[in-house]
Amino acid sequence: IIISFFLLWILIHLFHVSCILQWKYDHKLEMLCRRIINTLNNHDKKYFIILFSAMLVAAPLIYFFVMNPDQQARIQTMFDIEADIQGIGFQQWRGRVALANGGFAGQGYLSGDITQAGILPESHNDFIFCSIGEELGFLGAVAVPLLFSLMVIRGVKIALRIPDRFCALVVLGLVTKLALQVALNIAVVTNSMPNTGISLPFFSSGGTSLALQIFEMGIILNLSRYSRLKK
C-alpha cells in the first residue's frame, strides 16, 4: 500500500507542477506519468534513485529555462525577503511581522493590529494563519498544526487498517492532501517556500472549499467503518 501510495503521490505532484508552470499540453504529461508509474511499479529501488537524481538535475534547468521572471522572483524572495519588501515580498514580510506581533499569548480575538487593520493582504484567506498567530499568539499558532497532525495520524491509522486496497488508498490520498495543504500554507506565510496562494483548510474563507473539505472528511469517516480499529 505504501509503495502504491507513493506512486500516486508522484503522479499528483507532476500535475501540480504543470499547473504552476502553466503548461498547455497536460495530456502529454498524463502519458508521461503513466509510463513512470508503470516503470516504478516493480518496486525496484534503483528506479527511485534514478527518479530522485533526475529531479535534482531538472530543478535548476526548470528555474533558468522554464520559469518566467515573476516565478524566479518568488523563489529569490524566499532566500532574501528584505530585498523587495515593497514588491514581491510585501505580503510575506507583513505576515511575518503579524506573527511576531502576536507574542506568546496573542493580542486577543479580532484584536490584531496588523491583520484587522487591513495592512496584511488576504489575512482572511491565504494568510489567515498570520491572523491566528497575531490574535492567539504562539499558543494558537502551535495548536492549529497540532490539531491537523492529530487528524492526519488518525486518518493514516484508519487507512492502514482497512482491508480493501482501493479504500485504503482513497483515505491515504485525502489525509495526505490535507497534510500537504496545511504544510504548504504554513510554509508560505513563514517564508519557508515561495508564495503559491494555497489556503488553510477549514480556516480560510470560501464556502465551496469548506464544503469540499467537509465532504472529504465525510468520506474518511464513512470508510472508517470498514477499518479494524480497536475501540
Image (cartoon, rainbow, N blue to C red):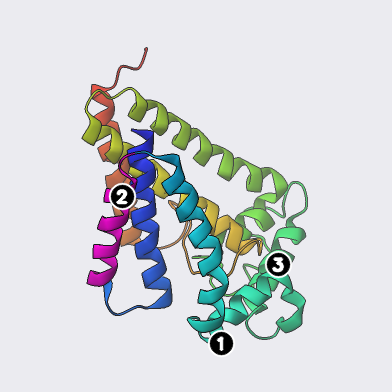
Mark 3 — residue?
A: 113
- Residue 116, placed above or below residue 200: below
Q: Which mark is residue 147?
A: none
Q: Amino acid at mark 2?
A: Thr
Label 3: few (<14), some (14–19) or many (≥20) C-alpha neighbours in 10 Å:
some
Q: Which residue is at 35% across, 17% downward?
A: 229
Q: Is residue 41 magenta?
A: yes
- Earlier along the polypeptide chain: callout 2 or callout 1? 2
Is residue 190 or residue 132 the one in the foreground?
190
The Cα atoms of the two marked residues, 3 and 1, are separated by 34 Å
**Secondary structure that dominates the magenta span:** helix
Is residue 88 or residue 47 the one in the foreground?
47
Q: Which residue is at 37% across, 71% downward?
A: 19
Q: Which mark is residue 69?
A: 1
Q: Which mark is residue 39?
A: 2
The picture places residue 146, in percent across and down from the top left corner, at 58, 38
Q: Amino acid at mark 3?
A: Asp
The Cα atoms of the two marked residues, 2 and 3, are separated by 54 Å
Task: Find the magenta span and give its range.
Answer: 27-42
Is residue 143 visible in the rendered image? The answer is: yes
